[in-house]
Amino acid sequence: MRNVKEIPVHSKSAPERASLGRHGEVDRLVTDLNRDGIVMLPDILSAKQLRGMQQAFAARLRHMRWNNFEGYSKTEPYRHMIEDVLMLDQGFVDLALHPLVKQILNSYMGTNYALTEAKGWKSLPTTTNWRTQSRTFWIIRRRLTRVDGRRRTPATATLRTR
């Protein structure tokens, strides 16, 4: 595993350097993140890194976790959870420490934050409509308070029952 200091500050490819140099791109991605709660990043990983990440993730999904045998946990009937993806492949660490990702996070949350865990999951296909069966639905809104207290975005995750 590489040391954080060994990961280059500037990306190697021209498209990555261009996206890092454009504050407008970071601003657009942060706006999307504020509006939608999710953002699609540009291609910041090489095909080799992505392939390694996919292979490591798929290998962990082959077996359920038990005792000291690593695998997935079944957190919900249709979801297989992998507890710590940062331990699977260097690509996951490189993604978390990528300068573009850090710029987006700094704009979104400020600079006083820490990555404490990273989980991944595979959602299994289902034809069950859980909303009509349980007669509940979720209204999801996000509340973000920066550590320095300067910014607040609206609201919370709310469970309502009919």
Image: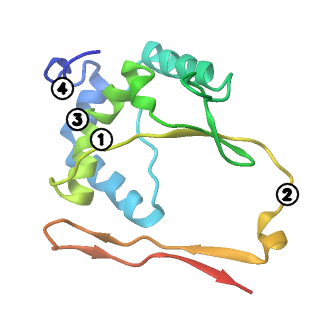
Q: Which mark is residue 47?
A: none
Q: Gap in Å between the C-alphas at discs 1 and 4?
A: 12 Å
Q: Gap in Å between the C-alphas at discs 2 and 1?
A: 35 Å
At 29% across and 28% down in the image, what residue appears? 16
User: Is tag 2's residue or tag 3's residue first in the polypeptide sequence?
Assistant: 3
Q: Contact, CB < 8 Å: mark 2 with mark 4?
A: no
Q: Gap in Å between the C-alphas at discs 3 and 4?
A: 7 Å
User: Is tag 3's residue or tag 4's residue first in the polypeptide sequence?
Assistant: 4
At 45% across and 31% down in the image, what residue appears? 85
Q: Quadrant of residue 18?
A: top left
Q: Contact, CB < 8 Å: mark 3 with mark 4?
A: yes
Indicate left or right for 114 with 156 as reference: left
The residue where tag 1 is placed is: 101
Q: Position of residue 116 (x, y in %)?
A: 31, 44
Give the mark toward the camera: 1 or 4. 1
Q: Contact, CB < 8 Å: mark 1 with mark 4?
A: no
The residue where tag 4 is placed is: 10
